[in-house]
């Protein structure tokens, strides 16, 4: 994809569906105008996101245009203090001259190919103001909110040390008043040992207080837990450069202040964010294990020792290499026309995959996603697409060893077919067709756990036909069967006979009884006589 040239601020606003300057008439200042721009941007990226079937090129153009407009806002370089100045007729005519540097800036941002998940943009749309601010401490007076909560034991130790030091100072300076000596000694020791204070120049992170309308609740960087919203915006946490691009794209959306920091402080913040031990909701690290930045390392060691003791006692959690029947790296990645694979580079075109679990036989990647990146590259080389979330376009759930159980539940609820690497290998080698794949026996989550997992190999595999599922004892009936069973037996209703008139009933009576001549004379005066058909009247008269 090549970025378009001769980009202007007018066209950047147009990419966000802002073509008329009157939309800014209700805005009192540039801040309110940028909020309006941000609202339009959120609406567009949610609609154009590739996870929802949107065009990746349009999505990238929308993001790049927003980042150009955001830079202008952060640097206070908006012409005449209003974005509407770029939408006037004169501005459109002079666009090529006034926005001569915008093209280079747009090209820079459009080269960013990282695409955060759709959930990230959905959560970001809920915030009108960035929820977090990162900066270097301007003074040494602010205190860490987390350390203040966990400083009970530290305060007791500090008070004991202060009393001991006070006694020494009081003895050596007996000529002075004892109260002044105690005060100065206590304050000196407290300042020296107070771990709650955020030192001058240290990186700190605060959150937005809606009641006060400003940022507060400052944290040491080591004490700050990376929120789930920020985690969702990271496309590749293992790559520092990619993570930095992701975090800078969050400026004025979820974060603020990062772009103003120097490169060294930016990378310090990035290294903290990509460390999963610092993520909120991570069960590996116990909350409150450390009472300050000085105890962060001890908390990590304690967590590791605790997990080691659980493993020794036979805990449920298994390590990545605990499967005995899998040889790490034994499966060779396929490519079109190589390794016995079909030559069709578009065999998986239009198919979207979600991956779960680890693939030891493939290898590569970190401990929690072994083989995932290599499989993603293989699927994309055959024209397929890999996403991290289910959507209406998802075709398959590719499961590896020890997958996430919720993925299976969600896949079944959305009628998404679950396959393993063995079946994907059969598709790419031409041993299976998509029609035949749908007829194979459905896979159960228990088949992917521990030693029950069937690793894939590059050898040919014979795929049998689907087997009828055996009815398990106590197994739940399908919803359709339950609904059918609940239906009460319907009674057969007798068809309603057509109502007969009095004279038609009298016809049957006259067949068994002698007719009365007087009755025949009174027939024309009967109630139903004139409503009877002519043939019925004739029949009665003849009788």
Image (tube, helix red, strand yellow):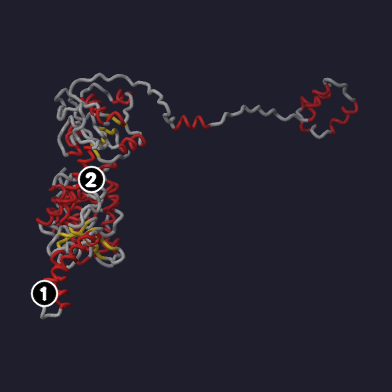
Q: Position of residue 406 (x, y in %)?
A: 32, 38
- Considering the numbered disc 1 on the image, is that residue within a helix, a strand or a loop? helix
Q: Position of residue 475 (x, y in %)?
A: 41, 29
Q: Residue at x 33, y 27 (%)?
A: 442
Using the image as rendered, state which of residue 181 and residue 39 is in the foreground. Answer: 181
Whether pointer 2 and pointer 1 mark residues with C-beta atoms closer than 8 Å, the reply is: no
Q: How many badges with numbers are in the image?
A: 2
Relative placement, left or right, of 440 versus 69 is right
Which of the 4 image quadrants contains residue 34?
bottom left
Q: Is residue 88 visible?
A: no
- Considering the numbered disc 2 on the image, is that residue within a helix, a strand or a loop? loop
What numbered label is drawn on residue 171? 1
Q: Quadrant of the C terminus?
A: top right
- Up the image or down, 230 lies above or below 184; here it is above
Using the image as rendered, state which of residue 290 and residue 231 is in the foreground. Answer: 290
Residue under numbered circle 2? 284
């Amino acid at each position: 994809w090549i970025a378009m040239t001769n980009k202007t601020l007018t066209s950047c606003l147009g990419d966000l569906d802002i073509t008329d300057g009157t939309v800014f008439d209700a805005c009192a200042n540039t801040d309110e105008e940028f909020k309006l721009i941000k609202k339009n941007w959120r609406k567009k990226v949610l609609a154009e996101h590739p996870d929802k079937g949107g065009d990746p090129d349009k999505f990238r153009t929308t993001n790049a245009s927003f980042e150009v407009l955001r830079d202008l806002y952060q640097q206070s370089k908006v012409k005449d203090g209003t974005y509407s100045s770029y939408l006037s007729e004169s501005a459109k005519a002079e666009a090529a001259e006034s926005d001569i540097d915008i093209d280079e800036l747009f090209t820079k941002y459009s080269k960013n190919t990282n695409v955060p998940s759709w959930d990230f943009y959905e959560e970001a749309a809920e915030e009108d103001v960035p929820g977090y601010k990162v900066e270097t401490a301007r003074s040494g007076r602010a205190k860490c909110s987390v350390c203040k909560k966990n400083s009970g034991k530290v305060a007791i130790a500090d008070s004991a040390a202060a009393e001991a030091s006070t006694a020494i100072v009081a003895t050596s300076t007996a000529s002075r008043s004892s109260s002044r000596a105690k005060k100065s000694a206590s304050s000196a020791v407290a300042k020296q040992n107070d771990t709650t204070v955020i030192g001058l120049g240290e990186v700190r992170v605060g959150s937005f207080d809606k009641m006060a309308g400003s940022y507060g609740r400052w944290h040491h960087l080591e004490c700050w837990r990376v929120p789930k919203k920020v985690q969702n915006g990271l496309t590749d946490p293992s790559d520092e450069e990619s993570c930095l691009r992701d975090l800078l794209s969050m400026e004025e959306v979820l974060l603020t202040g990062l772009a103003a920091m120097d490169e060294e402080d930016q990378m310090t913040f990035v290294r903290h964010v990509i460390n999963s031990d610092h993520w909120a909701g991570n069960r590996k690290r116990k909350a409150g294990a450390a009472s300050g930045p000085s105890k962060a390392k001890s908390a990590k060691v304690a967590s590791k020792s605790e997990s080691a003791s659980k493993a020794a006692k036979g805990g449920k959690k298994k390590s990545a290499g605990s499967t005995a029947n899998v040889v790490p790296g034994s499966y060779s990645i396929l490519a079109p026309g190589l390794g016995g694979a079909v030559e069709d580079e578009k065999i998986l075109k239009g198919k979207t995959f979600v991956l779960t679990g680890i693939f030891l036989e493939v290898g590569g990647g970190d401990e929690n996603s072994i083989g995932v990146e290599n499989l993603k590259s293989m699927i994309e080389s055959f024209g397929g697409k890999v996403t991290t979330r289910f959507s209406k376009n998802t075709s398959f759930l590719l499961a590896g060893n020890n997958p996430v159980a919720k993925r299976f539940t969600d896949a079944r609820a959305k009628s998404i077919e679950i396959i393993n690497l063995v079946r994907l290998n059969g598709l790419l080698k031409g041993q299976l067709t998509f029609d035949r794949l749908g007829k194979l026996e459905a896979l159960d989550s228990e088949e992917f756990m521990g030693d029950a997992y069937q690793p894939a190999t590059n050898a040919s595999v014979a795929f049998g036909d689907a087997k009828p599922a055996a009815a398990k004892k106590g197994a739940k009936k399908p919803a359709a069967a339950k609904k059918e069973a609940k239906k009460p037996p319907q009674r057969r209703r007798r068809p309603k006979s057509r109502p007969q008139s009095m004279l038609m009933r009298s016809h049957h009576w006259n067949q068994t009884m002698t007719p009365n001549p007087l009755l025949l004379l009174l027939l024309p005066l009967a109630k139903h006589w004139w409503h009877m058909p002519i043939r019925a009247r004739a029949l009665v008269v003849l009788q």
